[in-house]
């Protein structure tokens, strides 16, 4: 299938090369930013443009890998083609003017620095405006991953939120932990085995069962000592998450 | 060296077998709970007792692997031996009556279900009341790990706090994410590639640089949509962590 990517950011930089490797034809990259478009087109050895008027009309699929804030958007390229959103929180109806529209949402965190190379285990959520489009979307997803989920906008929104909790907020906690290490002149590296083990554990047991620590044990002495080490802002985060752990410990 | 373990919980169940494997002689397990003492003693093929009066007097080292709440505590066994705490937040002076006391704090999350098998990369923080004890503690630590850090109570407390943030709270976020997935009838497995990638990324870049998501992008529309999906308690967690990400994004 001939594919045009709309957008050349973190997601496109991982997904486009993976699709190409799987035998799809990425024929063009469109981005408003020349540097981004050119960089990705160079990797793919394909055409790029920064002008919406120059977007190729002969693609089978247009994949929109742009920031959620830009939706709703008028589709570009061929109206008869399949137009796919890659967002967790936008419905495909946000592609205005598409006859065939759908969702192709790979559930992973993407960055240009470290492109995701192994897509086999990356869950891909799909949805489409009609049966033929759904089959086409499924075919595209299957060439990357073994884990395809047909989804609704609602379940996708929940998954997206779960991703914010388990990725964005977890990463924020890593950053807050790093601030404590810096105060103690300890390197961030010291935390990596713990971070890895924390992630590994929930492969084997549920997160509530894996829960340990002062809040889980109800050790108010340690919690008070830790609170004394913190600025006010961190105190609030500490208290609200500890309260959640305590509340859920009682349920177990 | 002949070692007695005081406590047979999560930490002892990982550390005692690892020390034995490294050639140390675990001669006895003491725990107030018969089942725990017996279980660990069986694994180690060593003696156990539930009576403080029967604790062996001929050990070189007594390792206290008990809950922080139990400190301060009168030492058991030989007064001349080295008495080591395994806690992140208690000073060795909490071992009352010890002539030689110290800290042996392996910085990892432990559970009986999934004992830590590879200690080589687990950071161990050490501290002791005197030089000879410090050397002995260092020798013990080196037989398990290559990453030994001499620490003060203050730096250890910071590290412990960093561990609560990066392990306990991260795990709590996994649990909250799972609640969202349950509402969408999606399996927890769908989250694992993202959890793994989130942990992996901070091996390659700093957590602040790895930060992505609606808060990082300042996408208030998505944030508002996500808030609409949540109960009040989760709203508070979502808001406070998003605010922290936004504040720190401005610093980058």
Image (cartoon, coloured by chain):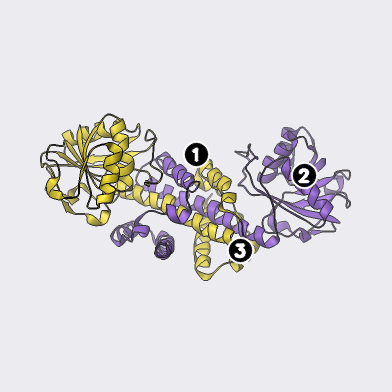
Chain colours: A yellow, B purple
Q: Position of residue A200 (x, y in %)?
A: 52, 41
> Which residue is pictured at 28% across the width and 40% down the height?
A42
Q: Quadrant of the C terminus of chain B?
A: bottom left
Q: Is residue A1 left or right of residue A122?
A: left
Chain to which the residue tagged by mark 2 belongs: B
Q: Is residue A223 left or right of residue A152?
A: right
Q: Quadrant of residue A147?
A: top left
Q: Quadrant of the N terminus of chain B?
A: top right
Mark 3, Cα crowd under 10 Å, few <14 / some 14-19 / many 20+, is many
Q: Nearer the viewer, mark 3 or mark 2?
A: 2
> Which residue is pictured at 47% across the width and 50% down the height?
B205
Q: Which numbered disc, 3 or 1, marks the residue that appears first in the sequence?
A: 1
Can the viewer see residue A153 in this picture?
A: no
Q: Quadrant of residue B13?
A: top right
Q: Position of residue B166 (x, y in %)?
A: 53, 53
Q: Are marks 3 and 1 on the same chain?
A: yes
Q: Position of residue B220 (x, y in %)?
A: 31, 62
> Which residue is pictured at 37% across the width and 33% down the height?
A120
Q: Quadrant of residue A27?
A: top left
Residue A203, numbered circle: 1
Q: Is residue B145 left or right of residue B139?
A: left
Q: Position of residue A40 (x, y in %)?
A: 29, 43
Q: Real-space Cα distance between discs 2 and 1?
A: 34 Å
Q: Which residue is mark 3?
A: A226
Mark 1, Cα crowd under 10 Å, few <14 / some 14-19 / many 20+, is some
Q: Are marks 2 and 1 on the same chain?
A: no
- SS at circle 2: helix
Residue B139, numbered circle: 2
- SS at circle 1: loop
């Amino acid at each position: 299938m001939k594919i045009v990517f709309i957008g050349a950011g973190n997601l496109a930089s991982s997904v486009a090369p993976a699709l190409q490797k799987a035998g799809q034809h990425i024929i063009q990259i469109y981005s408003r930013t020349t540097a981004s478009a050119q960089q990705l087109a160079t990797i793919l050895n394909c055409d790029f443009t920064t002008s919406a008027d120059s977007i190729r009309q002969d693609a089978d699929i247009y994949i929109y890998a742009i920031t959620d804030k830009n939706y709703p958007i008028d589709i570009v390229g061929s109206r008869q083609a399949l137009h796919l959103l890659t967002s967790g929180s936008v419905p495909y109806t946000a592609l205005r003017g598409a006859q065939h529209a759908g969702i192709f949402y790979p559930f992973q965190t993407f960055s240009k620095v470290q492109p995701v190379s192994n897509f086999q285990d990356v869950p891909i959520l799909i949805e489409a405006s009609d049966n033929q489009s759904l089959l086409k979307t499924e075919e595209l997803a299957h060439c990357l991953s073994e884990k395809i989920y047909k989804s609704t906008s609602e379940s996708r929104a929940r998954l997206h939120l779960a991703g914010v909790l388990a990725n964005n907020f977890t990463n924020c906690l890593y950053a807050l932990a790093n601030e404590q290490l810096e105060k103690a002149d300890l390197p961030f590296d010291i935390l990596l085995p713990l971070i890895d083990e924390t992630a590994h554990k929930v492969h084997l047991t549920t997160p509530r069962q894996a829960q340990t620590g002062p809040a889980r044990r109800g050790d108010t002495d340690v919690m008070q000592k830790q609170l004394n080490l913190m600025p006010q802002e961190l105190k609030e985060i500490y208290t609200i998450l500890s309260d959640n752990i305590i509340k859920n410990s009682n349920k177990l």
